[in-house]
Amino acid sequence: MALSGIQIYKLLPQTNCKDCGFPTCLAFAMKLAAKQVELSACPHVSEEARAQLAEASEPPVRLVTLRADGHEVKAGNEVVLFRHEKTFYNKPGLFVRVRDDEKADDVASKVLVADAYTVTYVGMELSLDGFAVEAVSGDPSAFSAAISTVRASTQRPLILMSRDPAIMAAGLRAVDGEKPLIYCADSQNWEEMAKLAKEHDAPLAVTANTLDELADLTTRLKEAGVLDLVLDPAARRLGEALIRNTQIRRLALKKNFRPLGYPIIAFPGDLEDRAMEVIMAAQSIAKYAGFIVLDHFAPETAYPLLVLRENIYTDPQKPIQVQPGLYEINDPSPDDPVLVTTNFSITYFSVANEVEGSGLPAWLLVADAEGMSVLTAWAAGKFDAERIAKSVKQFNVADKVSHKRIVLPGHVAVLSGELEEELPDWEIRVGPREAVDLPAFMKQAL
């Protein structure tokens, strides 16, 4: 049973040493009771008290990890319902499903294409996380062979899907030493599946038609010694999935209901309509799946899902940034102009896309402004003449161009005089205020 803040406080050293980062032990106890900190932050708690506080210090949603050949997919450990309350950390894993009744060549081709897919988004490489292999043939050897085919094409983590313990045992032998997700245990097979999960030290997915039945199964499995569980609330329609996923997350976080304190798995691929599959996947990313299994892969649908996931699972108080540096647009020569901007992603792409679309070559110097836009960074003192000059020198701009001319954003024309002092050998030009006007400015004034 969860402990209150006062009960936790009585078990702490009560020295107010501040080593935990809080001014008093009582403040730390209140945060621990709210699941907003971990017990390990207090270095002075006794072993006896640590044992008593174990349940209180556990996250309301258990962390579950899938592993394979150095790759990991983590889900759970979240402590809030909404990202503005506290940053979400463990992005839901996106998996592509294949079936053991498909031809081996078709399976390998599908996996190779999805495995190789990467896209660069604001300086980050985004890709899918793994593959699900489903046994539909009813043949253990066919299931094992399909897994081997997938494993020959990718080293990413796997979800193994069968409700037959004998078939699942054959599949697990094909990936011995890895940590796949076993899908799934139900009211009929949970005891045999529990044995397999313990034998292979693998997480186990659990499914039931109601939340009461789901909670009953997780309680039985925990008593049987299986701790890493994943919930399938058996909801395959948009409204039903949204309601059940939200109920599970709220019960885990708000009521500290341990039997439902596990990550959720979603199957948008079970929808026959491919457009609805993408919509369901997007909803699952937002509310509140930890593992998402797709039946179809296409770059035009994978890209928006990956970007959506990245946007939701970033710190809302820290804008998405691009890496500061000197970027080449349209293969510039030493004679082409040097434009300067900040490393706020929207600002960078606004400038880069306008210039790239015009076909005009240019060097784009991106200064570190802690992810702020031009005006915001200037007002905060994060985009000034000193920082711009430092970037010019740091990225060896003078070695890349035959001229010494740099173009400031029009919104910070006031910096031109100060920048001339910082870079006395450079000509400082003031560009337009809006990125959309850059191509015309470059043609007329540069």
Image: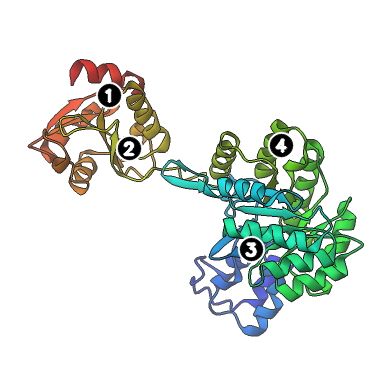
Which of the two residues, 317 or 164, is positioned nearer the viewer here?
164
- C-beta proximity under 8 Å, tags 4 and 2: no
Disc 3 to disc 2, C-alpha distance: 37 Å
Mark 1: which amino acid?
A: Leu
Dot 2: element: strand
Dot 3: element: strand
Mark 1 vs mark 3: give the one in front.
1
The earlier-in-sequence mark between 2 and 1 is 2
The earlier-in-sequence mark between 4 and 1 is 4
Residue on which disc 2 sits? 342
The earlier-in-sequence mark between 4 and 2 is 4
Residue on which disc 3 sits? 65
Percent position of residue 326, x then y: 26, 41
- At x 68%, y 66%, the residue is 5
The earlier-in-sequence mark between 3 and 4 is 3
Mark 2 vs mark 1: give the one in front.
1
Judge left or right: residue 358 versus residue 431: right
Judge left or right: residue 226 versus residue 283: right
Percent position of residue 259, x then y: 81, 62
Mark 3 vs mark 4: give the one in front.
4
Task: Indicate which disc residue 277 carries.
Answer: 4
Q: In which quarter of the image is the C terminus?
A: top left
- At x 33%, y 21%, the residue is 358
Judge left or right: residue 121 versus residue 103: left
Which of the two residues, 341 or 174, is positioned nearer the viewer here?
174
The earlier-in-sequence mark between 3 and 2 is 3
